[in-house]
Structures are given as structure tokens and as C-alpha cells.
């Protein structure tokens, strides 16, 4: 084995006194540690600067999608998993909608706030959202359920439109939107699949929830 001192001696024609050799050795070690420390710090700094903490990301395989955010320290924070056919969209400031397909017609939606880290469950067949009051409208068979976008202790509202008996309920919905304290719905009704417009009043309890 060739010693470090022998390597130094062989690389130069000038001999190094023992005292100066020890000083040189310590200097090289300290420089090496400082360079390594700077390199690691730079990598960490770049990762933190490149991370967007106000974004929901997805990493998908052929079977499932993992959903996560990036913390201010650059670490991944797991939210949930969706089907392999999952899309992420921003629905309002700091609020993301995670849409997961489960067939046709079939879907589930999860909502997540990057500001408060609040979330709901995977709700089936969401047809409308109200990001001002943090409400959703979704289908439950032939019934429309209006409830909190995130978990809350308020009771949902239930409405039963006169859907066409010859269509899948989710396919019968032409348009759904929140406006003021009402949910407006255009949908197919009757055996001839005729369009009908209805409005349903939302209970004060849902609007009074301290979001």
C-alpha cells in the first residue's frame, strides 16, 4: 500500500519537512470537507428553490397514481392514491381537484387545499363545485347531494330531480352550477329525454359553516 505521504513525495521533486507536511495534510483535509459541505448545501438549496409548495403532483404507474405535495423543506407529502387514470387541476387559489376515473360513466373527485392541508374524501360523480363556500354537488343514484368540499360536521342537503328513466343519472345531467344560495340544474327528463331546468335552495347551515 502506498501511503498518502509517499504519494505527495513522489509527485514533487522538492522534499517537504515533517512539520510542514503535517500542516499541509490538515489544510488539504479541511479544504476537502469545506468543498463537500458546499456541494451538498447547493444541491439542497436548488431542490428547495425548485419545489412549488402550492401544487399537487401525481406519479402514475399502469395501475395507480400517487398524489403528493412538496413541503417547504423539499420533502414529498403523501395525500392519497387514485386510479391509473387520474388528473389534477387547480379549481381555485390553493385548491386542487383530483379527478379519478373508474369507468364510463363513473368518476371520483378529491379536493385538497395546499394552504390549510384540508381535504375531503373521494366523492363519486361530482357535478358542480362552489369554491367560495367550499361546497360540492354530487350524484348518489337518482339523488343530488350538496355537502362540504372538505370534511365538516354540517348535514348535507338532498334533492331528487325527475330524471329520465331511460338514462344513466350522471349522463342525464346537462349542466349543474352554484349561483348565490341555489344549485341550478339542467337535465334530461321523461321518456323522450327532454331538457328541464330546476333550481334547489341550499340550506343556511351549509353556508354558515366557518370555512
Image (cartoon, grey):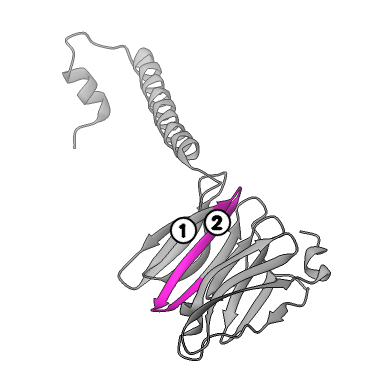
Image spot of residue 183 (x, y percent) = 67, 68
Q: Is residue 96 magenta?
A: yes
Q: Secondary structure at mark 1?
A: strand
Q: Which of the pair 154/24 is nearer the observer?
A: 154
Image spot of residue 7 (x, y percent) = 20, 25
Marks 2/1 in contact by CB < 8 Å: the verdict is: yes
Residue under label 2, please give it: 96
Q: How many labels, in total? A: 2
Q: Is residue 19 visible?
A: yes
Q: Is residue 149 visible?
A: no
Q: Residue at x 39, y 60 (%)?
A: 59
The image shows residue 101, relative to residue 27, as above or below, that is below
Image spot of residue 74 (x, y percent) = 51, 45
Q: CA distance from mark 2 to mark 1?
A: 7 Å
Q: Residue at x 62, y 71 (%)?
A: 137
Image spot of residue 193 (x, y percent) = 47, 83
Locate the C terminus by quadrant. bottom right
Q: Which residues are magenta?
A: 91-108
Q: Residue at x 75, y 70 (%)?
A: 202
Amino acid at each position: 500500500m502506498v501511503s498518502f505521504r509517499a504519494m505527495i513525495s513522489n509527485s514533487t521533486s522538492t522534499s517537504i519537512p515533517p512539520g510542514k507536511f503535517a500542516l499541509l495534510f490538515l489544510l488539504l483535509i479541511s479544504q476537502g470537507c469545506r468543498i463537500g459541505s458546499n456541494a451538498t448545501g447547493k444541491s439542497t438549496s436548488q431542490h428547495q428553490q425548485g419545489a412549488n409548495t402550492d401544487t399537487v403532483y401525481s406519479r402514475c404507474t399502469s395501475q395507480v397514481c400517487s398524489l403528493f405535495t412538496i413541503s417547504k423543506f423539499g420533502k414529498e407529502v403523501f395525500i392519497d392514491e387514485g386510479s391509473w387514470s387520474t388528473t389534477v387541476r387547480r379549481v381555485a387559489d390553493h385548491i386542487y381537484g383530483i379527478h379519478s376515473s373508474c369507468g364510463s360513466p363513473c368518476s371520483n373527485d378529491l379536493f385538497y387545499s395546499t394552504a390549510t392541508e384540508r381535504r375531503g374524501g373521494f366523492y363519486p360523480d361530482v357535478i358542480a363545485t362552489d369554491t367560495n363556500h367550499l361546497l360540492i354537488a354530487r350524484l348518489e343514484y337518482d339523488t343530488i347531494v350538496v355537502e362540504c368540499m372538505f370534511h365538516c360536521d354540517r348535514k348535507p342537503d338532498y334533492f331528487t330531480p325527475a330524471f329520465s328513466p331511460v338514462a344513466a343519472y350522471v349522463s342525464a345531467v346537462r349542466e349543474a352550477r352554484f349561483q348565490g344560495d341555489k344549485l341550478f340544474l339542467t337535465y334530461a327528463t321523461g321518456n323522450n329525454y327532454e331538457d328541464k331546468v330546476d333550481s334547489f335552495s341550499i340550506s343556511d347551515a351549509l353556508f354558515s359553516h366557518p370555512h
